[in-house]
Image: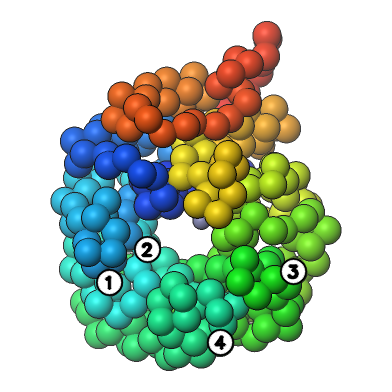
Amino acid sequence: MDQDIDILISEVGPRDGLQNTKQFMTTEYKKKWISAAAAAGLREIEVCSFVPPKLIPQMADAAEVVAHSLSIPGLNVAALAPNFRGAQSAMEAGVHKLTLTISVSKAHSLANVRMTPDEAIASAKKICAFRDSLPKDQRPIIESGLSTVFGCTLEGAVSEDEVVRMAVASVEAGCDEVGLADTTGYANPEQIRRVFKKVRAAIGDKLSGAHLHNTRGLGLANVVAALDVGVTTFDSSLGGLGGCPFAPGASGNIVTEDLVFMLEAMGLRTGIDLEKLLALRKILEEGIPDEPLYGYVPLAGITKGFVPATRH
Ligand SMILES: [Zn+2]
């Protein structure tokens, strides 16, 4: 973590958001968005996922988007990969951080990547070994992004012991970090505190961030719960982009604008300029005009006399 911020916000809209939108965003608009987000003070952006274009056509320009992102000074360029092939392409493209999606729910894992959770761990081990065979300056940080940690639309409740086991297995496979994702928007604040504590007890500071969805409106409450137990990295997406295909009308990731407002108002520095961040929505309104955008602060405006913790 940089010295001048308290919380790292990792913008995942270009990946998690666009992966779930119906409308296609052109490469030009993606580049514009990523550049403007970095200029607003975002330090880490998950810019794409390396998946077969046949499955997700929106990500067909992944390598080009990464190349553009790498040209932005100081930006930590992250990408997601579901399997070895994708991970290899991401490393060839030169990403700084690679997140592997590993689902704790067996049913979700099979549906999503056609591997059981244990097979996904074996794949992660192969990916980490490949990474370690590269020259030192070409090795990305590898994060195990554990998904469906707090509940699954297919299986319902997910065993917390299983979450801990998968976190430990991820570290043993060679992953540098483990993040916990509420992929389905099932989590509640008490559960967030309990599960993050359990996982930290097992893997210590290898536990990285929280990836929360706002599907049932508990996103920011869950952020506060995660703050309570020492989490300092959060994923979010501009305009809560992406929605949820299984819950019409429900937003996707937690909304970056609302998250930054809350953290800055609480005295926690994000390094992000809220006015510039709000102005970014224009790029989405132009680039994907039919997609609904979410967020309360963009509608209500910044409070009068607002003093952000981050000084610009
Ligand atoms: Zn997500």
**Residue type at numbered disc 3:** Val
Which residue is depicted at the point 36% across and 56% down?
A: 78
**Chain-order first, disc 1 or disc 3:** 1
C-alpha distance separating marks 1 and 2: 8 Å
**Secondary structure type for disc 3:** helix
Which residue is depicted at the point 53% across and 49% down?
A: 244
In this figure, which residue is indicated by the disc labeled 3? Answer: 195
Label 2 CA crowd tier, 10 Å (few <14, some 14–19, many 20+):
many
**Chain-order first, disc 4 or disc 3:** 4
Q: In the image, residue 212 lies at what x, y percent?
A: 61, 53
**Secondary structure type for disc 1:** helix
Disc 1 CB within 8 Å of nearest ligand 1 atom = no
**Chain-order first, disc 1 or disc 2:** 2
Q: Are marks 4 and 1 in contact (CB under 8 Å)?
A: no
Q: Which mark is residue 169?
A: 4
**Secondary structure type for disc 4:** helix
